[in-house]
Image: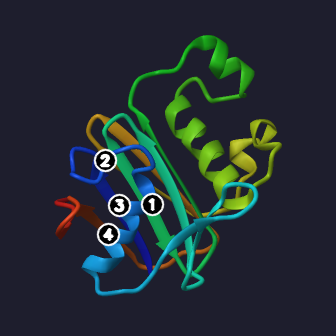
């Protein structure tokens, strides 16, 4: 199972270092004793052994949890500059998706050469989520069932589709 959680950062848990208390609060809401830490490369780790990937943009935090390796990125749905498109080999017709794919790939693999990754050669399944005005991309090692929720700092609700 892949759990994807969107959190508006208007919650009471938004101060500096907001992702750790917010994610741990999410697990407490589920009555799970799971803590978040980071390895020497700043990759997030869950105490129960599941994989987690974290991203935020402006006032939204998104995190994805899975038994398999996973990567997530979120970007505002506005086109990047032509210079960025050229520098990172992004498709000019899908630059936001390509940028998110590269970022999610890095978070999943920790491959520091991700800027040289050619998107069409990536064979990992991915999920695209439109959360206006944002675009979210989740990259996974293999397909699995997906659950998408909104967590407001106190309660969990399914994302309306």
Verify CB contact (< 8 Å) between mark 1 and mark 3: yes
Residue shown at 42% from the left, 47% from the top? 136
Verify CB contact (< 8 Å) between mark 2 and mark 3: yes
Q: Is residue 48 above or below residue 35?
A: below
Look at the numbered disc 4 and give the secondary structure of its residue: helix
Instruction: Specify which label sits upstream in the sequence, 1 or 4.
Output: 1
Query: Is 47 in front, or is 117?
Result: 47
Residue shown at 62% from the left, 29% from the top? 91
How many angstroms separate mark 1 from mark 4 (CA)?
8 Å
Q: Quadrant of residue 38?
A: bottom right
Look at the numbered disc 1 and give the secondary structure of its residue: helix
Residue shown at 73% from the left, 59% from the top? 109
In this figure, which residue is indicated by the disc labeled 4?
25
How many angstroms separate mark 4 from mark 2 (CA)?
12 Å
Residue shown at 76% from the left, 36% from the top? 115
Q: Give the crowd class for mark 2: few <14, some 14-19, many >=20 residues within 10 Å.
A: some
Verify CB contact (< 8 Å) between mark 3 and mark 4: yes
In this figure, which residue is indicated by the disc labeled 3?
22
Q: Is residue 104 above or below residue 146?
A: above
Instruction: Return the x and y of residue 140 as percentages of the image width and height.
Output: 59, 66
Instruction: Specify which label sits upstream in the sequence, 1 or 2.
Output: 2
In this figure, which residue is indicated by the disc labeled 2?
14
Q: Give the crowd class for mark 1: few <14, some 14-19, many >=20 residues within 10 Å.
A: some
């Amino acid at each position: 199972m892949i759990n994807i959680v969107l959190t508006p950062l208007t919650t009471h848990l938004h101060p500096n270092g907001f992702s750790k208390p917010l994610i741990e609060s999410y697990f407490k809401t589920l009555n799970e004793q799971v803590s978040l830490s980071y390895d020497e490369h700043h990759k997030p780790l869950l105490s129960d052994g599941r994989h987690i990937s974290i991203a935020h943009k402006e006032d939204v935090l998104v995190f994805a949890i899975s038994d398999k390796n996973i990567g997530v990125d979120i970007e505002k749905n506005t086109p990047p500059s032509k210079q960025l498109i050229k520098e990172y080999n992004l498709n000019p017709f899908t630059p936001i998706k390509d940028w998110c794919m590269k970022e999610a790939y890095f978070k999943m693999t920790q491959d520091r050469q991700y800027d040289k990754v050619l998107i069409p050669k990536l064979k990992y399944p991915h999920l695209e989520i439109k959360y206006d005005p944002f675009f979210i991309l989740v990259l996974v090692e293999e397909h699995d069932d997906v659950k998408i929720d909104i967590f407001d700092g106190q309660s969990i609700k399914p994302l309306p589709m």
